[in-house]
Image (cartoon, rainbow, N blue to C red):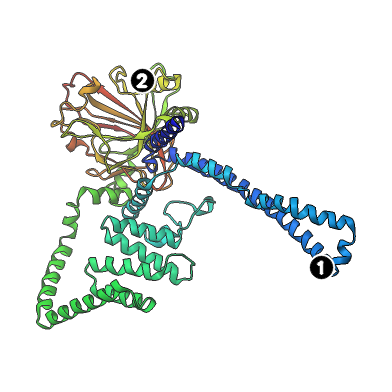
């Protein structure tokens, strides 16, 4: 008994450990790919179970058909049938033995193996937080790239060639309803309305679903009411009551909405509404006349979302004509004198240069292989506590690789040193990042600012003076690196990289601005090397960007 209790405790402990180890799965496509293979194994196990059940039913059916024919013949002349001694013997045998065997066959549980596999694999399943996180990531993508619910529901995402996507997936009424419920749970009534309306449209178009239209209308009317649309909320409530006249909450809401609308109409008759309309019209005219000025003062979030969509870029045709391509050997460096690397100008002010074919496919594969088992939720530095913590504005997983783990890592580090001229001895380990559903890194600085003098003290490397980032994935849509102040956006391109050099004490905000990795419509892999200096450079130079 004690041994059983110990085994149960160990099993529960294992399940809890595995669940903790696999939380935030939605933040990494690298780990989500494992779930696909887990699901494939489950499907194989399920098909085996179906075959076993079908085999059992086949045996039962054959027995029933044989006995049906036999009993039909025997009951026509029972005495004559039993007059044959073999028939009499076989009747005794069937009832005493064979029917018992059939009973055992029918009672045999063919699902044991499948349930066992399901129990083992369940420890790798995502949890409720992962489902909620993936849903909210989808809502973020919807806002950033101004996607309508119909496009998302039908799988028609921008920048993706649908003819090349055999795995294009559509959303059911249940899917849309679930997104609406998750938005509702966070008091996000705007997205609740959008996704409940999409679910209702699909129901109206005839899609079969276990979700009832009355349930959708209940959420829809309340979310619309919360946004101040009383008349629309009343219309949805009336439609709900047509489907379910006894709906208690809807009957109460109907009276309340009608009462509030009557009060609004009384106010309009008193002229209050006209005065408010006049104020709104005047204010609207002022906003329209100052639209261009207001554009310059958009919150940083709206600025970077526009850049992520490819809007608001500040590169004129004349400036673009000055961009060029070249071969680069870093002042005749011995390793690149014969085989220089490819450079392409992406931006002029600041100077952004993309290095092409700077890392091989084999090196990318090895870096991914080394990093994948160690991927964990990416953290940020909390300036108040000085500790590393997760944050909703950084949705990804990362791992760190040292040069002695594999020759590929050492070779990559040497390449960075050769092309930048900066020492690797005080650099941080190679960081590998994997962005999952709606992965992003909102406005941030890679270096410690003036009010964070001890940001990297625990690393013993000094403040960061440069960032080198390899793109290890091609992305058809989203995933750009943008700079809001200069209006620059650079799309990821596999086997290319960028280097960002911080030569302080110049005010870096004036030279550059916060780095932003746009939300991904597809997953991306990247690896980053942060180079640091224990001694602050005395020279004040312009910030240099190599991308």
- Point out residue 487 in the picture as x, y percentages from the top left corner: 26, 45
> Looking at the rendering, in which quadrant would you find the N terminus?
top left
Q: Residue furthest bottom?
A: 269
The image quadrant that residue 237 belongs to is bottom left
Residue at mark 1 to residue at mark 2: CA–CA distance = 97 Å
Q: Which residue is mark 1?
A: 75
Q: Please tell me which residue is depicted at 39% across the width and 65% down the height of the picture.
A: 198
The answer to whether residue 495 shows anywhere in this view is: no
Reply above or below: 533 against 222. Answer: above
Of the numbered discs in the image, which one, if any, rests on residue 418?
A: 2
Label pair 1/2, CB-CB below 8 angstroms: no
What's the residue at 24%, 71% (across, down)? 229
Of callouts 1 and 2, the N-terminal one: 1
Side of 3 relative to 237 (left or right) = right
In this rendered view, identify the residue nearer to me: 200 or 482. Answer: 200
- In depth, the one of 328 and 109 nearer the eye is 109
The image quadrant of residue 2 is top left
Q: Quadrant of residue 411?
A: top left
Please say whether residue 194 is visible from this viewpoint.
yes
């Amino acid at each position: 008994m004690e041994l059983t209790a110990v085994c149960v405790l160990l099993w529960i402990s294992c399940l809890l450990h595995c669940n903790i180890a696999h939380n935030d799965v939605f933040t990494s496509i690298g780990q989500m790919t494992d779930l696909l293979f887990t699901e494939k194994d489950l499907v194989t196990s399920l098909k085996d179970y179906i075959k076993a059940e079908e085999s059992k039913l086949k045996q039962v059916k054959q027995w029933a058909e044989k006995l049906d024919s036999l009993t039909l013949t025997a009951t026509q002349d029972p005495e004559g049938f039993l007059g044959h001694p073999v028939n009499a013997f076989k009747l005794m045998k069937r009832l005493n033995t064979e029917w018992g065997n059939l009973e055992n066959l029918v009672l045999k549980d063919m699902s044991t193996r499948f349930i066992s596999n399901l129990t083992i694999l369940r420890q790798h399943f995502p949890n409720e937080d992962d489902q909620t996180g993936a849903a909210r990531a989808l809502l973020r993508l919807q806002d950033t790239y101004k996607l309508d619910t119909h496009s998302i529901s039908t799988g028609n995402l921008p920048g993706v060639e649908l003819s090349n996507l055999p795995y294009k997936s559509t959303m059911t009424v249940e899917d849309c309803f679930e997104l609406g419920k998750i938005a509702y749970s966070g008091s996000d009534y705007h997205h609740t309305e959008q996704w409940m309306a999409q679910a209702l449209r699909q129901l109206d178009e005839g899609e079969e679903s276990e979700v009832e239209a009355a349930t959708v209308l209940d959420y829809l009317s309340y979310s619309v009411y919360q946004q101040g649309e009383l008349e629309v909320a009343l219309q949805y409530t009336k439609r709900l009551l047509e489907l379910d006249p006894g709906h208690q909450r809807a009957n109460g809401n109907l009276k309340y909405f009608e009462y509030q609308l009557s009060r609004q109409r009384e106010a309009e008759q008193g002229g209050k509404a006209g005065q408010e309309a006049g104020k709104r019209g005047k204010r609207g005219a002022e906003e329209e006349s100052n639209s261009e000025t207001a554009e310059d003062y958009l919150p940083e979030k709206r600025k970077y979302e526009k850049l992520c969509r490819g809007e608001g870029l500040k590169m004129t045709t004349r400036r673009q004509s000055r961009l060029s391509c070249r071969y680069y050997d870093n002042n005749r460096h011995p390793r690149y004198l014969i085989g220089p690397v490819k450079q392409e100008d992406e931006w002029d002010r600041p100077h952004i240069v993309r290095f092409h074919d700077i890392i091989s496919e084999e090196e990318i594969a090895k870096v991914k292989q080394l990093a994948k088992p160690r991927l964990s939720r990416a953290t940020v530095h909390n300036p108040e506590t000085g500790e590393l913590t997760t944050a909703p504005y950084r949705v990804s997983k990362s791992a760190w690789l040292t040069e002695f783990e594999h020759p590929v890592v050492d070779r990559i580090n040497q390449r960075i040193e050769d092309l930048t001229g900066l020492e690797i001895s005080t650099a941080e380990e190679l960081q590998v990042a994997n962005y999952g559903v709606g992965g992003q890194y909102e406005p941030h600085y890679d270096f410690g600012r003036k009010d964070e003098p001890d940001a990297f003290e625990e690393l013993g490397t000094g403040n960061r003076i440069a960032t080198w980032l390899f793109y290890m994935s091609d992305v058809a849509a989203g995933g750009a690196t943008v700079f809001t102040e200069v209006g620059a956006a650079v799309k990821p391109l596999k086997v290319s990289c960028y280097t960002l050099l911080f030569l302080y004490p110049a005010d870096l905000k004036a030279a550059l601005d916060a780095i932003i990795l746009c939300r991904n419509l597809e997953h991306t892999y990247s690896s980053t090397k942060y180079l640091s200096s224990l001694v602050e450079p005395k020279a004040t130079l312009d910030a240099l960007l190599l991308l």
